[in-house]
Amino acid sequence: RPGSTFLESSPSRVTQVTGIPPAIHHDNELTLSLIFHSLCFLASRFSFSLYGIIPVILGIFSLLLLMLCGFFGYQYFQSVQESESKMKSFNQWNESFQNKEKKFIQVQKLLDQNKEILEKLQNQNKNMTEALQELKAKGGDGCGSPLSHWVQHRDHCYYQTMKTVSWSECSDLCVFWNATFLNTERSRLMCILKLLAVNQTWLGLSYKEKDNEWKWEDGSLPSGLKWHLPKPSMDFQGKCVYAGVHTVGIDNCTMSSSCLCEKPVCA
């Protein structure tokens, strides 16, 4: 440049222009040069330090991110476990509720059955009361002396023999008492059995192999008693029916038992 050339070629001119001697001006240039190089060195070191700090910062952020991931993962795992625990508790509660519901239904059925039994007992009690009133009104005269152990029910008299025989011998034993072996089902038969305080006595009812049926000796089928008898089967060959106060059952016809005899009320 023209100015630079002029300063360099004419030191005295420099002194005149700047008012600074050439030696001092040269020292200033050296100082500025040193400052410039120092700044460059510091800048390079700062850049180097910055490049070294960035990975550290990134590592710290990565570590923090990893810790956050671990924390949220742990929280998620805990929430999953709590959900499973709550679901398990709910399933147990639901199962318990269903069991209680089943028990309630069973109890309800049992109550219904007991209600039916109670109604039957009430009907039986009513029938017995009517039968006792009839006996009390007639005083047993229609069947002879009360000491003869005959019991009257409506238009027939009934007797349970003291002697025990096989089922096939009951007809002859009843003939001895001028009566017939009970061979047909009359209404309120169970009331009659209660009046007689029957322990176990033969009825004129047995299994007929030819017809595969339970039949009375007059050939009729049981009506009210059929609910107390098993379904007819060849397995019951040689089986006869006996009655008790509260039960009707079957046994081998050859077994010895008392017989239930009947006859019309004396005119």
Image (cartoon, helix red, strand yellow):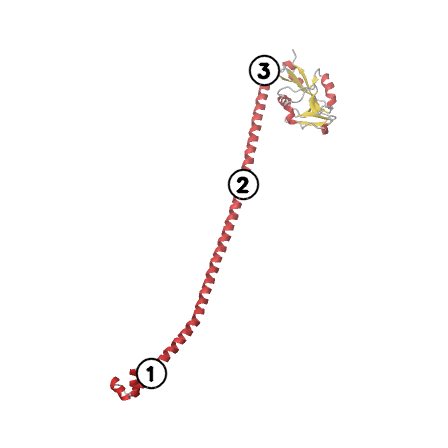
Q: Is residue 200 left or right of residue 29?
A: right
- The Cα atoms of the two marked residues, 2 and 1, are separated by 98 Å
Mark 2 highlights which residue?
98
Closer to the N terminus: mark 3 or mark 1? 1
Q: Residues within 10 Å of mark 3 (few under 14, many from 20)?
A: few
Q: Quadrant of the C terminus?
A: top right
Q: Is residue 35 left or right of residue 154?
A: left
Mark 1 highlights which residue?
31
Looking at the image, residue 38 lies above or below residue 225: below
**Which x, y percent locates residue 112?**
55, 31
Query: Does the residue at mark 3 contact the one at mark 2 (Cβ under 8 Å)?
Result: no
Closer to the N terminus: mark 2 or mark 1? 1
Relative to the observer, which residue lies in front, 163 or 63?
Answer: 63
Q: Is residue 108 left or right of residue 264?
A: left
Residue 254 quadrant: top right
Q: Is residue 196 left or right of residue 35?
A: right
- Res 247 seen here: no
Q: Quadrant of the N terminus?
A: bottom left
Residue at 55% x, 36% y: name it.
Answer: 105
Relative to the observer, which residue lies in front, 15 or 252?
Answer: 15
Mark 3 highlights which residue?
137
